[in-house]
Amino acid sequence: MADDEIHLSRKQARAGASTHVTRYVLPISLVLIVLLFALLLFFWR
């Protein structure tokens, strides 16, 4: 059974390209939400 192992490279295992866009989504959305809440707090009074 141990002879049946298949070894794939990292790229083959992922089967896709990595654009690294997702690392920017969380910080940008977090900043936008904080700004939105700050604006709501300022103008809601």
Image (cartoon, rainbow, N blue to C red):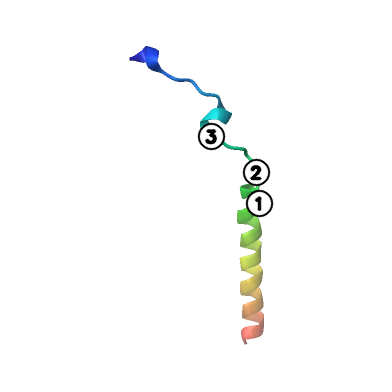
As helix, strand or loop, the secondary structure at mark 1 comes to helix
Residue 43 in the image, given as x and y percentages of width and height = 66, 84
Q: Residue furthest bottom?
A: 45
Residue visible at 38% across and 16% down?
A: 4
Q: Residues within 10 Å of mark 3 (few under 14, many from 20)?
A: few
Q: Is residue 32 left or right of residue 10?
A: right
Residue visible at 64% across and 56% down?
A: 27
Mark 2 in CB contact with mark 1 (< 8 angstroms): yes
The residue where tag 3 is placed is 14
**Mark with earlier residue (1, 3):** 3
Disc 1 vs disc 3: which is toward the camera? 3
**Mark with earlier residue (2, 3):** 3
Residue 44 in the image, given as x and y percentages of width and height = 62, 85
Screen quadrant of the N terminus: top left
Screen quadrant of the C terminus: bottom right
As helix, strand or loop, the secondary structure at mark 2 comes to loop
Q: State the separation of the CA atoms marked 1 and 3.
A: 20 Å
Q: State the separation of the CA atoms marked 2 and 1.
A: 8 Å
Q: Residues within 10 Å of mark 2 (few under 14, many from 20)?
A: few
Type of amino acid at the residue the image marks with label 1? Tyr
Q: Camera-side residue: 16 or 2?
A: 16
Q: Is residue 39 above or below residue 16?
A: below
Residue 25 in the image, given as x and y percentages of width and height = 62, 54
Q: State the separation of the CA atoms marked 2 and 3.
A: 14 Å
The residue where tag 1 is placed is 24
Q: Camera-side residue: 34 or 21?
A: 21
The residue where tag 2 is placed is 20
Residue 16 in the image, given as x and y percentages of width and height = 58, 37
Mark 1 in CB contact with mark 3 (< 8 angstroms): no
User: In the rendering, which numbered label is found on residue 34?
Assistant: none
